[in-house]
Image (cartoon, rainbow, N blue to C red):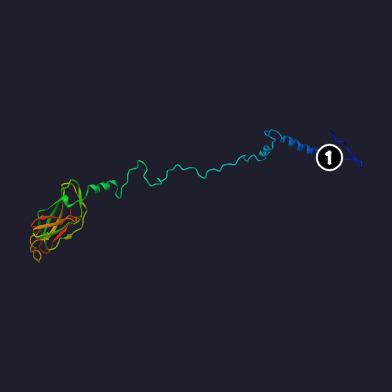
Amino acid sequence: MPTPLIHRGGRSTGRRRTAPLLAAGALLALAAAGCGDGTGPNTASGVAAAASPSSPSSPVQPAPSSAPSSVPSSGPADGKAPAGAPPTTGSGGGAAAQARTTASRCTVTGLRMRLGRADHGAGQAYFPLLFTNTSGHSCVLRGFPGVSLLRGDGSTIGTPAGREGPTGAAVRLAPGATVEADLHTLNQGIRGGGCWRAPTLLKAYPPGSKDAMTLTTSQPVVCGGTFEVGAVH
């Protein structure tokens, strides 16, 4: 209903009371709107959203620090080779290991020894000491054989042969193949000191072997104090 005008001292107070009443009416209108179903644009949440449109209504999940890598690692953690990977071997690989297996060092059980024909020239005498592979597989010899001349009772004549020349490369002997090491002495009369007596046996250790082989022979007759053996070739 209209507010009556009250006169005090001849002045009207109606205008002063009108502004507070209008402000109170506005607050009541907002409160009434707040009692609605909450779906309208004038709800409290709607007002907050309108005031801060960039503020999310729920917490934002942080982005992962890095995406999963598609590059495989350098190898399994347990150190095992991946399935289907070729087997590996020790130093030299599979081919080298096979070569060592099929061409191991020749042994006395797979060798035959004989003395070849002497070569005399310019006061020097050379006798080829021959080793033949009698086994059914390839084998290797490298270096110098150990050679001594023996009497019939097994005692040594003079001293064992000294080494002459370089060691040389390893020689691979296929089954039935032969390698030689040259025995060297001097012809009689080339140098003083005379000659040793003729041997009954020749004893030889093939290169790298601790087992000896013996051969019945009367050669070589060592003269001039020179008795040497070269590497197999």
Height in image: 141 above or below 52? below
Residue drawn where x is 24% and y is 48% of the image? 101
Height in image: 215 above or below 17? below
Residue 89 in percent (x, y) is at: 31, 47
Horizontal placement of 108 versus 86: left or right?
left
Q: How many marks?
A: 1
Residue drawn where x is 78% and y is 38% of the image? 24
Mark 1 neighbour class, 10 Å CA radius: few under 14, some 14 to 19, many 20 or more? few
Horizontal placement of 32 versus 200: left or right?
right
According to the picture, the residue beneath numbered tag 1 turns out to be 17
Q: Residue furthest bottom?
A: 192
Mark 1 secondary-structure assignment:
helix
Q: Quadrant of the N terminus?
A: top right
Residue 80 in percent (x, y) is at: 37, 45
Horizontal placement of 103 versus 58: left or right?
left
Front residue of this view, candidates 182 and 218: 218
Residue 218 in percent (x, y) is at: 7, 57
The amino acid type found where label 1 is placed reads Arg
Front residue of this view, candidates 37 and 95: 37
Q: Determine the image quadrant of residue 49.
A: top right
Residue 158 in percent (x, y) is at: 12, 63
Q: Determine the image quadrant of residue 63.
A: top right
